[in-house]
Amino acid sequence: MPGRKKKDPQKLLIGTILEAMKDKIAKNPVVLDFSKIKSTVCDAFVICHGNSRTQVDAIAQYVIEEVKKATGLNPWHKEGFENAEWILIDYGDVVIHIFQEERRKFYNLERLWGDANTILMETTE
């Protein structure tokens, strides 16, 4: 239809990820936007943490389900489900990191990638 704007697929993906995280009460979700930085492996990281192995696993599984429903996408790669201390879900241009709180503090990806544009989301603490 003329005049109808098509939704940006990456914004839809990130929005779906954040909504799924919120639904599972993920802690301190943040988006690191690399789109203005040359030579990065992806356009964005979406990072959050949970309070336990069970919650981290539940967040990850729910994110995968909701992304599939909203976009039809399956992850290119996923890892960390064995012990659920740090689960990584790779959708190509967007990579999700779901940590247990201690691991998130230890690796501190927000500081490591400090040159990215950091978009803080609603905190759930």
Image (cartoon, rainbow, N blue to C red):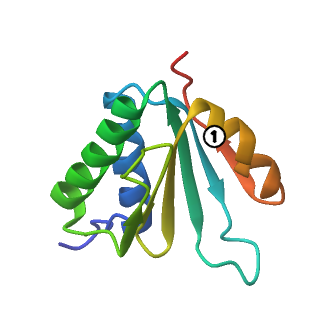
Tell me the quadrant of the picture where the C terminus can be found: top right
x and y, in percent, of residue 54 in the image: 34, 31
In the picture shown, does residue 32 fall above or below 120? below
> Label 1: how many residues lie within 10 Å, few (<14), some (14-19) or many (20+)?
few
Q: Report the residue at 56% width, 23% height from top.
A: 123
x and y, in percent, of residue 51 in the image: 48, 24
Left or right side of 86 for 73: left
Which residue of the protein is positioned furthest toward the bottom in this rendering? 39
Asked whether residue 20 appears in the rendered view, the answer is: no
In the picture shown, does residue 74 fall above or below 100? below
Q: Report the residue at 36% width, 58% height from top.
A: 12
Please give the residue where the numbered disc 1 appears in the rendered image: 103
Q: Report the residue at 33% width, 66% height from top.
A: 5
Relative to the observer, which residue lies in front, 16 or 95? 95
x and y, in percent, of residue 93 in the image: 50, 73
Tell me which corner region of the image, top left, top right, bottom left or bottom right, holds residue 22: top left
Asked whether residue 101 appears in the rendered view, the answer is: yes
Which residue of the protein is positioned furthest toward the front in this rendering? 83
